[in-house]
Amino acid sequence: MWRGGAMDRDGNIALKKAAMRVAMVARRRSIPEPLRVEMNREIAARLLALPELLTVRHIHIYLSHQALAEVDTVQIIEALAVMKKRLSVPLVRVGDISSAQYHPGDEVKATLAGYPEPAVYTEADESDIDLVVVPLLSFDARGYRLGYGKGMYDRFFCRLSCSGLTPFRLGVSYLQQQCEKLPVDPWDEPLDAVVHQAGIIRYT
């Protein structure tokens, strides 16, 4: 578990986060691929067994970036489709997230940043999103997540909240990415839960 011992408590939060991003990407990539594949299966099984899935209808879920060794969402998406859940995935436009309808097998393309998104898309109705599956680099005991530094999910959640929408915020992560306490900015939006290969941590 990252303890951040080398970081000055009064140091710059942006620098702290940047250092953690480098460390956490390296830590995730250092996990042997066969082990990551097995952990992806365990994470998918635990996510798909969540009681929340009995009632949610519309799930916003990211398309995983393999080069960054993110938790793979392919089998999760396929299983959710079999469960007849309506799916949407992130579109990044002018630095902000919107939602596109998605079905397993839809053609995807890589953005300039390397993230996959639908090659052809129809915007999704965000007013009935019940659950958002969020990528992360690290998470802590309070429910805060470390993302990639663009603030897109924070603004996405803030925009939904300002419209009176409060979907369940679910992070997916390898347990190796857990840290004791993340540096936090005032605009950082916490999660409701994190699923990892050994279980689930709930914050609400």
Image (cartoon, rainbow, N blue to C red):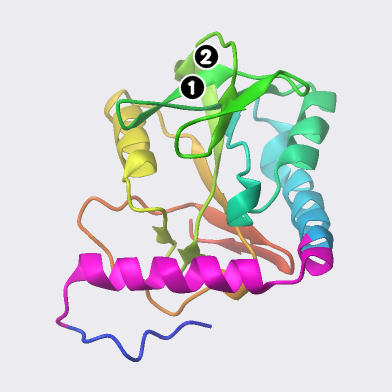
Q: Is residue 175 visible?
A: no
Q: Can residue 157 be seen in this view?
A: yes
Q: Which residue lies furthest to the bottom in this view?
A: 5
Q: Is mark 2 on a helix, strand or loop?
A: loop
**Earlier-in-chain disc, 2 versus 1:** 1
User: Cβ–Cβ below 8 Å for labels 2 and 1?
Assistant: yes
Density class for disc 2 (Cα within 10 Å; few <14, some 14-19, many ≥20) is many
Q: Is residue 9 left or right of residue 30?
A: left
Name the residue nearer the viewer: 104 or 79: 104
* Residue 104 drawn at (x, y percent): 76, 24
Name the residue nearer the viewer: 22 or 13: 22
**What's the residue type where badge 1 is placed?**
Ser
From mark 2 to mark 1, how far is it between C-alphas? 5 Å
The residue indicated by pointer 2 is 124
Q: Residue furthest front?
A: 112
Q: Is mark 1 on a helix, strand or loop?
A: strand
**What's the residue type where badge 2 is placed?**
Ala
- Res 87 → quadrant: top right
- Res 22 → quadrant: bottom left
Residue drawn at the location 78% of the way across and 25% of the way down: 81
The residue indicated by pointer 1 is 99
Q: In this view, does 200 lie to the left or right of 138?
A: right
Residue extent of the magenta highlight: 10-36
Residue drawn at the location 45% of the way across and 39% of the way down: 113
* Residue 152 drawn at (x, y percent): 35, 39
**Mark sitting on residue 32:** none
